[in-house]
């Protein structure tokens, strides 16, 4: 959206004011907008453990989990880029880097 000229703050406001109006989205949305990834209560390696568990369970039932696979890959990229100590909301930073922002 930023490459299309939509401000990140505005995008989060639209999402959290409609379909994603739950507090968890509002909280993580603000962390992403402010790039406040240091309050790492849930660091990337913990998220990676969870994603691997989800994917292992899904694989045991022959279920594809495309979004979980994408999240796992982004977590691995973030950790490889030195972001292991950041809150897992820093996945937004990884995604931004992947598109040249």
Image: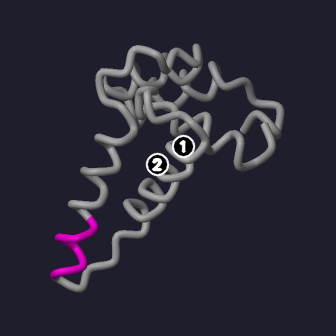
Taking the image as shown, residue 1 lies to the left or right of residue 27, namely right
Secondary structure of residue under mark 2: helix
- The foreground one among 91 and 19 is 91
**Picture coordinates of residue 56 (x, y %)?**
22, 71
**Picture coordinates of residue 46 (x, y %)?**
29, 40
- Residue topped by disc 1: 78
Q: Is residue 98 above or below residue 60?
A: above
Q: Give the residue displayed 41% in from the left and 34% down from the top.
A: 88
Evaluate if marks 1 and 2 touch, with contact meaning CB atoms under 8 Å apart: yes
Q: In this view, does 69 lie above or below 71?
A: below
**The C terminus sits in image quarter:** top right
Q: Is residue 79 above or below residue 10?
A: below
Taking the image as shown, residue 55 lies to the left or right of residue 81, namely left
- Residue topped by disc 2: 75
* Magenta segment boundaries in residue numbering: 55-60
- The foreground one among 97 and 49 is 49
Secondary structure of residue under mark 1: helix
């Amino acid at each position: 959206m930023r490459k299309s000229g939509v401000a990140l703050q505005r995008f989060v406001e639209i999402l959290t004011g409609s379909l994603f109006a739950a507090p968890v989205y509002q909280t993580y949305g603000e962390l992403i907008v402010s790039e406040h990834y240091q309050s790492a209560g849930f660091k990337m390696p913990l998220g990676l453990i969870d994603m691997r568990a989800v994917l292992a369970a899904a694989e045991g039932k022959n279920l594809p989990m495309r979004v979980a696979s994408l999240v796992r890959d982004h977590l691995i990229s973030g950790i490889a880029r030195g972001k292991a100590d950041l809150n897992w909301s820093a996945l937004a930073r990884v995604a931004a880097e992947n598109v040249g922002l």
